Amino acid sequence: MISGLFGSTPFVAVVGSIFVLFVTVFAPSWWSSVHRLPLPAGAEWIWGHEKTVFMNQAGHAFRKWINEVGLTFRIKAAFGAPDILVIADPVGIAHILQKKIYDYPHSSVSRPRIARLLGKGLGWVEGEGEHKRMRRLVNPSLSAENIKAMSPLVAEAAMTVIESLTQFVRDEGGRVEVNAIEWTGKAALNVIGRVAFLHDFEGGNSEEARQILQTKKEGASLVAQYASFSTLMLLRRFPLLNYVPLRAIQGQAVTKTTIQSGVAHEMIKRNQGLVSLDEKDLLSRLLSAAGPDAVSTSELYAQISTFIIAGFDSSNLTLGFVLWELARQPHIQEKLREEVTSLAREPTYEDIQSRLPYLEAVMKEAFRLYPGLPYMERTAATMDTIPLGTPVRLSNGKVVHEVDVKPGQTVIFPAIAIQRLNSVWGDGDTFRPERWLEELPSKDKLCSGWSNLLTFGDGPRNCIGWRLAVFQAKLILSALITRFRFEDTGMEMTLRVASSLQPWMRKSADEPALRQVPIIFHLL
């Protein structure tokens, strides 16, 4: 009958194909449960709003849209994928991260990316039971008690690199421009090697350390390219591309592969049979696991690559960002130096934890402005109703205090935008540590993670290594501030997202931007 109405079978096939294309590409966004939420202007036909997010400074587009349409809205995804729900409302975020996190797994875009970047370890695993099993294994090694017990190892590992940096600057006449994240990367890698795996990266100078640092740098450079953006947008629409050997995709796995094929193998071989439950490091606990918490060989490799990469990368970049801010604001730098030097000794664990309030404020401000994961992406696995602290007006004029979502709904929390909102912080883009020594904004405007930030996430799936990350960053900064004066090179920084937040700088408009934080180190 259809062919009688429309003619030949080929014509029917063409019409049918167009209909299928229409249904699979365009209709899902119409069926989305969030289709009545506010929609910012400026969506492009192919790229939706996602190209705008990529082409601007990290967080800039989301902050603009929050100011225009409110804390809860939708954006158009690339290639006609269903609309993305954006939540900057603290109540809605807490609902998902604290109460329903296991109903919101990583998306089909982000989960394969985690596997490529880190391995199929704690950051990748889904399901409440399996996640809790892995976390139970790892948690004792990263507890407050264990970090305190291992603090001498942290200090020793960090000081190895700092003394090497001191000698380098001295050999250059006492004042030289360096790429700060090359040295902070060595320090952070040396710390995670010693504390988590009893492994000596030789101050970041061993062959495997050089390979890890170099491949991480190259991988971030590749992901930040526009071609990579195009590929990643295709992944949202066609997840099967995750398994196609495209350079922009598989380049993310270089650092993980380097670790698993080299240093992880040596760590396991050297320590197997030599560990006991009395050991405090992470590797010993993994190797000695038995019973229901037993660790397979593949998981062992995945956990090693996960904690090496995640352990050094975030601390490295946070330190680079804070040194750049101190170089640009000498009065803050001097105030911090005065506080640390007033101890008249190298800070102890207790000093760093509770006796240096301005150091604490400086680091909190760095974590506020420069979260390692600027965006968090999840996908609803079940029907859910997300409560909101701030009501939202739908396109039909109705004002609601909740949003209903269906399975498959992608949700993004733009942490870097939330943590820089002028409506919350007053001067959101300004590096001003004093804000942490004053009265904070009202609780209803703040998220409920560490220090009211989303930098380490929140709830059962927050960053398990946050204590070590904060402690080692404060320890390294306290050592650097008493040995060097930091001077600004005058270069402007661009913040890009290459899985994590990355600094890009260029000396002039004629030169390419590079992943670097150039600072003049002046020996005191």
Image (cartoon, grey):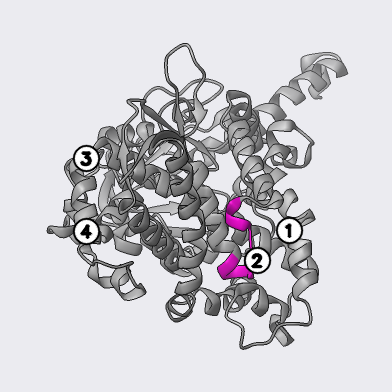
Rendered view: 476 above or below 399: below
Q: Which residues are magenta?
A: 194-204
Separation of disc 1 and disc 2 at Cα? Answer: 9 Å
Residue 67: name its quadrant: top left
Q: Amino acid at mark 2?
A: His
Q: Earlier in the sequence, mark 4 or mark 1?
A: 1
Say which element carries label 3. Answer: helix
**Disc 1 designates what residue?**
263
Which badge, 3 or 4, comes first in the chain's sequence?
Answer: 3
Most extreme residue toward the top, as rendered? 510
Decide: few, some or many residues near mark 1? Use Cα within 10 Å; few <14, some 14-19, many ≥20. Answer: many
Q: Nearer the viewer, residue 242 or 252?
A: 252
Q: Residues within 10 Å of mark 2 (few under 14, many from 20)?
A: some
Residue 201 sits inside the magenta stretch: yes
Measured as percent of width and height from the top left, residue 215 is found at 66, 41
User: Which badge, 1 or 3, is on the more N-terminal residue?
Assistant: 1
Q: Does 310 sit left or right of 210 as displayed?
A: left
Q: Earlier in the sequence, mark 3 or mark 2?
A: 2
Tell me the kind of residue under disc 4: Tyr
Query: Which mark is in front, 1 or 2?
Result: 2
Q: CA distance from mark 1 to mark 3?
A: 40 Å
The disc label shown at residue 330, or none:
3
SS assignment at label 4: helix
Residue at the spot 48% in from the left edge and 29% down from the top edge:
54
Main SS of the magenta part reads helix
Q: CA distance from mark 4 to mark 1?
A: 38 Å
Q: CA distance from mark 4 to mark 2?
A: 33 Å
Please give the residue where the numbered disc 4 appears in the rendered image: 358
**Which numbered circle lies on residue 199?**
2
- Please state which amino acid type lies under the numbered disc 1: Val
Q: In which quadrant of the rendered view does residue 1 lie?
A: top right
Nearest the viewer among 402 and 281 is: 281
